Amino acid sequence: MKPKFTTKKVVNSKNFTTANITEVPQEYTCPKVTGEVTYNGKEDSDGIAITAVYKLGDKSVYAYTTYLQSIESGSTESFEINPISTELPDHDSVEVYVQNW
């Protein structure tokens, strides 16, 4: 199965940057989103929420959130967002947002 999105938007903030955002086809479920998040905060974080927002044009059509339990200041961690669904709505882009949890 080919990935559905044609573009991706990297949304960075003061404390977080994301990189290598990719939609990865799966054999039996919908594609997952993988990437890396770097935490630039001054102190370690007890947890972060990472949300993929799937869009068609300017309209959000689906969103799914995953969590990392902890992340050290200055570190980069890989993540996977695996929506619990066999199919995603049609979309042409995905945006990834990260925040403290």
Image (cartoon, grey):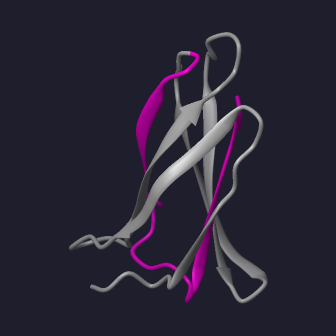
Q: Which residue is drawn at 69% across and 21% down?
A: 41
Is 43 above or below relative to 64?
Answer: above
Q: Which of 32 and 76 is in front in this view?
A: 76
Is 56 above or below relative to 46?
Answer: below
* 86 to the left or right of 91: left
* 57 to the left or right of 19: right
Q: Position of residue 18 (x, y in %)?
A: 56, 48
User: What is the quadrant of residue 79 in the picture?
Assistant: top left
Which quadrant of the rendered structure holds the C terminus? top right
Q: Position of residue 67 (x, y in %)?
A: 55, 36
Q: Give the range drawn in magenta.
A: 73-101
* 94 to the left or right of 4: right
Q: Which residue is drawn at 38% across and 73% down?
A: 30
Count of numbered circles in the view: 0
Q: Which residue is drawn at 21% across and 73% down?
A: 27
User: What is the quadrant of residue 46 in the picture?
Assistant: top right
Q: Residue at x 50, y 51 (%)?
A: 19
Q: Can residue 81 be seen in this view?
A: no
* 58 to the left or right of 35: right
Q: Is residue 27 visible?
A: yes
Q: Where is residue 73 in the image (x, y as percent from the top left)?
A: 58, 16
Examine the structure image and report whether residue 19 is included in the region drawn in magenta. no
Is 98 above or below relative to 83?
Answer: above
Examine the structure image and report whether residue 84 is included in the region drawn in magenta. yes
Q: Position of residue 81 (x, y in %)?
A: 46, 53
Which quadrant of the rendered structure holds the N terminus? bottom left
Q: Residue furthest top?
A: 43
